[in-house]
Image: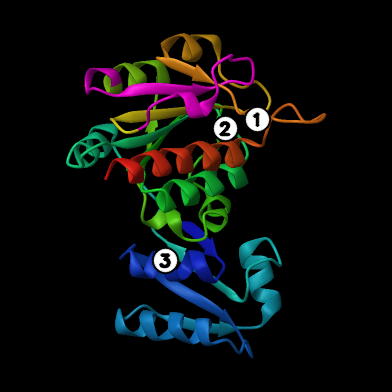
Amino acid sequence: MDKLTGIHAVKEALEAQRPIEHIVIAKGRQDTRIEEIVQLARKKSIPVRFEDRSQLDRLANSKDHQGVVALAAARAAAALDDILASANQARAGLIILLDGVEDPHNLGAIVRTALAAGAHGVVIPERRAAGLTDTVARSSAGALAHLPVAKVTNLARAMGELKQAGYWLVGLDERADKTYTEVDYTSRVGIVLGSEGQGLHELTRKRCDFVVSLPTTGPVKSLNVSVAAGVVLFEAIRQRNRRK
């Protein structure tokens, strides 16, 4: 079972029809958003218990739960084929590939930004990367319930599958001479981002069709990976909106 903590994560799981065993609410918690969760749960015949806040602290292993914890069925990762099938129904698919992002807060933020940008899915490696945890769900502010995330055993092979499906792969690397605005994002595109410390692995970099950088000024030479994802995704939106 997965523990979902926080108002956004629990509400989005309910709205996304994710199987939930029961929900625990802190006694005395007065919030219209909590009331919405209780009403949604009762409509779906999901048991709701009211407990002392200290009990929720123990259940969540944290005090940062906003007075609501849900026990839900473990989240199954999506299949890459399903993401491609969904993306291929659009005029121009947009998929994010992460080369070993390890911080669950970064992964959650990327999922949220990808959903806001209209991406069709995120691809992550099974090993040496953040998994689909409660922290990711919370950091995504519920977006994880709506955007498919595929786990793959071999990212290079997944990149090859995207290429065969007609995708251009754009990797981000601070060493690149070409900047992110010099690439066309209006066709099928996979945006490839590296890990927090290492960036793109060399094999991943070589498999990209384009490698681009985000120019910075001053002493800061690179951006947080979730911020970088947002910059490039919304450049893609800007270009695509101009083509409409």
Gap in Å between the C-alphas at discs 1 and 2?
Answer: 6 Å
Residue at 44%, 23% (x, y): give it. 170
Which residue is at 57% across, 32% downward? 101
Q: Is residue 223 within the magenta segment?
A: no
**Quadrant of the frame with the N terminus:** bottom left
Q: Say which amino acid is labelled 3.
A: Glu
Question: Do residues under tags 3 and 2 come within 8 Å of each other at their CB atoms?
Answer: no
Q: Amino acid at mark 2?
A: Val
Q: Which residue sits at x=55%, y=48%?
A: 109
- Residue wearing tag 2: 101
Which numbered dot is residue 196? Answer: 1
Q: Give the answer, above or below, for where 111 lies relative to 155.
A: below
Q: Nearer the viewer, residue 46 or 98?
A: 98
Residue 10 is situated, as x and y percent measured from the top left of the image, at 47, 68
Q: Which residues are magenta?
A: 163-185
Specify few, some or many for label 1: CA neighbours under 10 Å numbering under 14, 14-19, or 20 or more.
Answer: some
Task: Answer whether labels 1 and 2 touch (C-beta < 8 Å).
Answer: yes
Q: Earlier in the sequence, mark 1 or mark 3?
A: 3
Quadrant housing residue 237: top left
Q: Residue at x 44, y 71 (%)?
A: 11
**149 left or right of 219 in image:** left
Question: Tag on residue 65?
Answer: none
Report crowding for label 2: few under 14, some 14 to 19, many 20 or more residues within 10 A (C-alpha): many
Residue underneath mark 3: 12
Q: Going by the image, does 203 lie left or right of 52?
A: left
Q: Nearer the viewer, residue 106 or 174?
A: 174
Q: Position of residue 3 (x, y in %)?
A: 52, 60
Q: Position of residue 242 (x, y in %)?
A: 34, 43
